[in-house]
Image (cartoon, coloured by chain):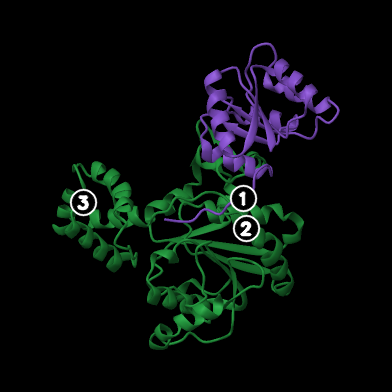
Amino acid sequence: MKTCLVVDDSSVVRKIARRILEDMDFQIVEAEDGREALEVCKRAMPEAVLLDWNMPVMDGYEFLGNLRRMPGGDAPKVVFCTTENGMDHISRALHAGANEYIMKPFDKDIVTAKFQEVGLVAFTEQSSV
Amino acid sequence: MTPPDYEYLRKLLKDHSGLDLSADKQYLIESRLLPLSRKCGVPGIGELVQKMKGGSSSIIAQVVEAMTTNETFFFRDKVPFDHFRDTIMPEMLKARAGRKSIRIWCAAGSTGQEPYSLAMSLKEMGAALAGWRVEIIATDLSTEVLEKSKSGVYSQFEVQRGLPIQLLVKYFKQNGELWQISPELRAMVQHRQLNLLHDFSQLGTFDIIFCRNVLIYFDQDTKISIFGRLAKVMEGDGFLVLGAAETVVGLTDVFKPFPDKRGLYRPSGARAASPQGATSMPKIAAMAGR
């Protein structure tokens, strides 16, 4: 089973994300901010990180920079999930090594689509009508 | 919805658009037509039907549009676009090296996600297409969705389903909560209103036809007729792409499946069978196809 680290300072968002990702057969680890998330990654690198941008202590952007400099830190697929919906933020995130970007609000379809996009889950064909 | 109302709508949709609803599609009618009744200022579908019976052609047109418009997203099903990039275009680049032009038809272009996905795929091929002229014609029954397609404007929700973030950054411009595809890509797609039930030979001849998730609505004879007419507007070495739930197998032999590429077909060179002949064929062909 793949592990997804969910990093968000809102416990409600973490709970929603957990429910969606558990349905997609991920094992979930939660962190409230970037520093906590780094600690998790030091213990065991997850396959995926769903990452908020604005958080106290250490924000998602700073976490991403630190993660990518860690040994083995280039392996996890990092998907931002944030209310920072501007093109400038998206470009910065991609430049810093994010693999995908979700603009909040999000739902199961969007998370699934984005996780498919980065190869974390298999594509399924939608049937019509 | 009363059974007579349902029957009335079924028949009307069949006559106007070829849409062939089975007896159990009440939910589909309700989900599409309740918002429309609100828009028309009537409380429900019964009243909407009354207005239609009163002869309001504008309401009939809106009902047909609402029922035939599909939800769609960028790079829907992914596989057809992999075929496009990895199989169709490499073959076409060889086969058309002389005239350096390719014509593509999106026969159910809807709100533009499919034609623009193809346009982006073409842009991503970069130098391989330098000096080539590639036309994309997007047609749809609904003028409303064609207008949306022309505008190239999508909601935040729409651009997050199927569209890789790198392509969003590269080919879209943000305008508040909305995203508009670049003028360069919009210029690659031409739009025409078209009902597949009617003659479409005036569109010219195509190398590639995407006709996905529209034939499922039609009955067997209509499908056979459309396949026959599609074959007539396609180059002998062209490609036909159908939706995941669609096939020619058991319906016609004017197209044959491309080996090991699901949803991909090529003209067989066979002439379209007459409708009488075709109706007796399917059973045998369907069994042979399994």
**What whole-number distance in Å separates the C-alpha atoms at marks 2 and 3?**
39 Å
Instruction: Give the quadrant of the C terminus of chain A.
Output: bottom left
Relative to B168, say whether B84 is above or below.
below
Cβ atoms at labels 3 and 1 below 8 Å apart:
no
Crowd rating for badge 1 (residues with CA inside 10 Å; few <14, some 14–19, many 20+): some
Label the green chain with its letter: B
Relative to B216, say whether A65 is above or below.
above
Residue that numbered label 2 is attached to: B79
Q: Position of residue A43 (x, y in %)?
A: 79, 23
Which numbered dot is residue B1?
A: 3
Relative to A72, say whether B254 is above or below.
below
> For this rendering, which residue is in front, B61 or B274?
B274
Q: Secondary structure at mark 1?
A: loop
Which amino acid type corresponds to the residue marked 2 in the rendered image?
A: Val
Residue that numbered label 1 is attached to: A123
Label the purple chain with its letter: A
Image point (58%, 52%), residue name: A124
Q: Are marks 2 and 3 on the same chain?
A: yes
Image point (55%, 18%), residue name: A11
Which numbered dot is residue B47?
A: none
Crowd rating for badge 2 (residues with CA inside 10 Å; few <14, some 14–19, many 20+): some
Which amino acid type corresponds to the residue marked 1 in the rendered image?
A: Phe
The mark that comes first in sequence, 2 or 3, is 3
